[in-house]
């Protein structure tokens, strides 16, 4: 099954709608790279170089394993200081990290860890047979009618197009992730967990940024946003080795 580890940040990227909410903790396992905004007053963060920032609070000198967004390489960085973003519309914590050992490293996600763990970006994944895919599609379309969207900004209806259906390495024989196009907001995708005939909504408007394994466990890194002008972005980490999917901070 899947466990949903949510590390969400809803923050301003739109001038018309200015809002920010405190991010979730990600259960202390992951930290998201803070993409520095050129018009924000945060001199301690930058897009590149030795000094960069992640979302959340980390103790000084805490080690953090940066996970490459280009390949399966990693780099160990250390937290230097934490501080609030101090945005007028709502503040959230940031932590500056020191990338002296790899100043040109490109990452979207980092693991909070005391030692380097085996990391691998995953490409192609096992898909379902034609007959199994048809069965899964029928069950999801039927059961999705009774499922609530992830939030009021993420209403969904399933496109008539065939879904993409695949398995993570650690998932059970009859468990799959199914990805549909969202007919309500073109460009968004609706993601489900299908397991032994049961259907659960992972997110109704997310996009897969990467699929990877870390320390023997497999994960999906999703990003999501609001396409109706509200201006927030967020991240969602799904672990493929656990029992009870859950959402937090919605």
Image (spheres, rainbow, N blue to C red):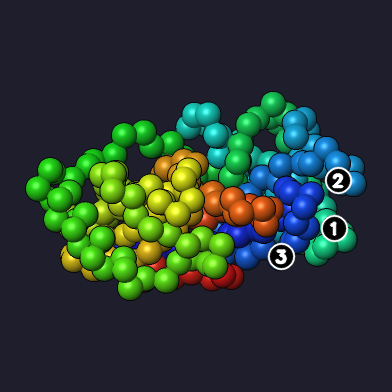
Q: Badge 2: few (under 14), some or many (20 or more) residues near its Cα, within 10 Å?
A: few
* Residue drawn at x 73%, y 48% as measured from the top left: 13
Q: Is residue 218 visible?
A: no
* Residue drawn at x 61%, y 54% as measured from the top left: 228
- In the displayed structure, 186 sits above or below 89; it is above
- In the displayed structure, 101 sits above or below 15; it is above
* Residue drawn at x 48%, y 32% as measured from the top left: 72
Numbered circle sitting on residue 21: 3
Q: How many marks?
A: 3
Marked residue nearer the N-terminal end (1 or 2): 2
* Residue drawn at x 38%, y 47% as measured from the top left: 181
Q: Nearer the viewer, residue 184 or 102?
A: 184
Q: Position of residue 106 (x, y in %)?
A: 63, 31
Left or right, residue 78 beside residue 173 = right
Q: Which residue is mark 1?
A: 87
Element assignment for label 1: loop
Quadrant of the image containing the C terminus: bottom right
């Amino acid at each position: 099954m899947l466990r949903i580890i949510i590390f969400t940040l809803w923050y301003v990227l739109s001038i018309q709608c200015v809002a920010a909410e405190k991010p979730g903790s990600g259960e202390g396992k992951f930290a998201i790279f803070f993409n520095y905004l050129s018009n924000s007053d945060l001199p301690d963060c930058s897009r590149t170089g030795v000094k960069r920032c992640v979302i959340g609070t980390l103790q000084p000198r805490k080690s953090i394993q940066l996970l490459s967004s280009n390949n399966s390489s990693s780099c160990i960085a250390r937290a230097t200081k934490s501080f609030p973003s101090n945005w007028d519309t709502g503040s959230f914590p940031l932590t500056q990290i020191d990338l002296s050992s790899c100043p040109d490293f490109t990452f979207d996600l980092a693991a909070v860890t005391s030692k380097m763990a085996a990391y691998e970006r995953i490409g192609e994944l096992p898909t379902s047979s034609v007959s199994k895919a048809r069965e899964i599609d029928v069950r999801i379309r039927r059961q999705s009618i009774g499922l609530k969207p992830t939030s009021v900004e993420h209403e969904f209806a399933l496109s008539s197009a065939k879904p993409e259906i695949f398995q993570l390495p650690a998932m059970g024989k009859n468990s799959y992730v199914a990805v549909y196009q969202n007919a309500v907001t073109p460009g968004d995708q609706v993601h489900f967990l299908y397991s032994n005939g049961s259907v659960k909504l992972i997110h109704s408007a997310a996009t897969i940024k990467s699929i990877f394994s870390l320390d023997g466990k497999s994960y999906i890194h999703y990003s999501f946003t609001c396409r109706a002008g509200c201006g927030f972005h967020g991240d969602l980490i799904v672990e493929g080795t656990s029992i009870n999917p859950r959402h937090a901070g919605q």
